[in-house]
Amino acid sequence: MLTAIKERLIQRVDGLSPLLISLAKEIHKKPELAFEEYFASQLLTSALEKYGFKIETGIAGLETAFRAVYQKGDSRPAIGFLAEYDALPEVGHGCGHNLIGPASIGAAIALSQADIKGRIVVVGTPAEEKGGGKVILAKKGIFNDLDAAMMVHPSNDTEVVKRSLAAIDVTVEYSGRPAHAAASPWKGINALDALIMAYNNISALRQQLRPDVRIHGIITNGGAAPNIIPAYTSGIFLVRALQMKDAKKVLEKVKECFAAAAKATGAKVKITVGENAYEAFRPNYPLSEAFRKNLLSLGIRLKKEDEYKELGSSDVGNVSQIIPTLHPNLDICHKQIPHHTLEFKEMACSESGMKGMIVAAKAMAMTAADIILDKELLKRMKGPHRKI
């Protein structure tokens, strides 16, 4: 029975492929930054509504977030498909998010047409690149009534299990006293000196940190003119680690670096920690194994994986801390093209990118069928989360 259902799901996704490709290309042509994804959000919700999904927009107070629900019979299991659609400054869809939303709705629509009961939920999640849309949605309890969530990220390699780092953003501001840099520099308090010292303090701190810890930042305001002692400077830093508790411990050391620079220069310091920290991704191995088998059945080649290789951060980590979550990478390049580049942007609208999106939709729909029809799988998935 399950095999026959999966074969029909594959056929349904194939039937939806013209729509999904059109959506992906339209979103690619009109990139929108974090919390501004009005076009993409409307495009995806309109498609879902035509297939009988009940649409709720503006969820959790986010104008470009949405929830689309299709229910047949029982309300459980409830399977969530996560849709991302935000772009980057300058490089547009250089991370391939134009493919993520269409893949997720393709899986959801195909599943809604299958002869199985349950609740299918698509959650439109804005601002993954900056702002943490899923963090805000998680705080508002949007994911709490789901049994599992899934999405597939386009990449330059296929990795079913991929870790991500917890990430905390922190802004530092220094206030000094202006003075003429040549005529009377001794009358000033140099806020730029404070920021440079803080930057160097952090550079020295890195020598004593664990290998999984990352600290990096930029100067966002370095002063007004070279002949004026800077009275105000600011910078933004990110603190990352494999565990949030470790990131928080390192954050306290970073704050001390900031404070030491203020004391050394006489400047006043203001430290603001971001409200929407990204949690580390928590893999769910039973769910990942089900997805892996479905990928293999679709003819996708898999090599030995290293889930700790080249780690970044994503707000999907916050979802994974609440419910079993799938967030694999799927190769659309077949060569090592870095994310967040113009080259990757081109791949996200290429024939290879579209083929990868269709594969992602099929594998997610098939995995959702596994979850709905295999009670033992659902039990194994939920086991680790009961221990949180």
Image (cartoon, rainbow, N blue to C red):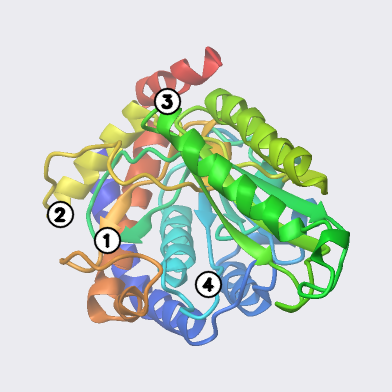
Q: Earlier in the sequence, mark 3 or mark 1?
A: 1
Q: CA distance from mark 2 to mark 4?
A: 29 Å
At which x and y percent is residue 221?
A: 71, 67
Q: CA distance from mark 1 to mark 2?
A: 9 Å
Cβ–Cβ under 8 Å for marks 3 and 4: no
Horizontally, residue 240 falls left or right of residue 228, namely left
At which x and y percent is residue 365?
A: 37, 51
Residue assigned mark 1: 359
Q: CA distance from mark 3 to mark 1?
A: 23 Å
* Residue name at image x 76 percent, y 47 percent: 265
Crowding around mark 3 (Cα neighbors within 10 Å: few <14, some 14 to 19, many 20+) is some
Q: Earlier in the sequence, mark 1 or mark 4?
A: 4
Cβ–Cβ under 8 Å for marks 2 and 4: no
266 or 368: nearer the eye?
Answer: 266
Q: CA distance from mark 3 to mark 4?
A: 36 Å
The answer to which quarter of the image holds residue 201 is: top right
Residue 300's disc is 2
Residue 88's disc is 4
Q: Amino acid at mark 2?
A: Ile
Q: Residue furthest front?
A: 183
Looking at the rendered structure, the secondary structure element under dot 3 is helix
Residue assigned mark 3: 378
In the picture, which quadrant includes the C terminus? top right
Give above or below for 180 relative to 247.
below
